[in-house]
Amino acid sequence: MINLIFQIVFSCILVFEISAVHVVSLLHSFKLYFQHVKVIPLLNVHEGDQVVWKHNPNGVYIVRSDYHLIMESLIDNSSLKVVAN
């Protein structure tokens, strides 16, 4: 970890011409940020994942359904639709 911090500081000073004081301040800000992120609880869901693609009747994504979705958005086919009774 110390090696990574040294590399970041060295890169910022050399490449971006940022002063060491600014780099230390930036690293301190990141440290505070990551301390807040670490306390966010992970989602604890006990149900399995499922595949859902609303543009296909069985919910599975296939390229064909995506192609039709894109083509419908590009081509005005409203004159071809029939109103059901």
Image (tube, rainbow, N blue to C red):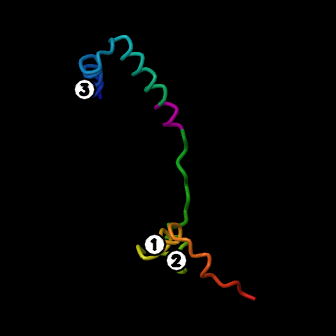
Q: Amino acid at mark 1?
A: Tyr
Numbered mark located on residue 56 in the image: 2
Q: Nearer the viewer, residue 14 or 67?
A: 67
- Residue 38 is a magenta residue: yes
- Give the mark, 3 or 1, whose residue is nearer the N terminus: 3
Numbered mark located on residue 39 in the image: none
Q: Which residues are magenta?
A: 34-39
Q: Amino acid at mark 3?
A: Asn
- Residue 60 is a magenta residue: no
Secondary structure under the numbered disc 1 in the rendered image: loop
C-beta proximity under 8 Å, tags 3 and 1: no
Q: Nearer the viewer, mark 3 or mark 2?
A: 2
Q: Amino acid at mark 2?
A: Asn
Numbered mark located on residue 3 in the image: 3
Secondary structure under the numbered disc 3 in the rendered image: helix
**In x, y percent, where is residue 67?**
44, 72
**In x, y percent, where is residue 44?**
55, 54
Numbered mark located on residue 61 in the image: 1
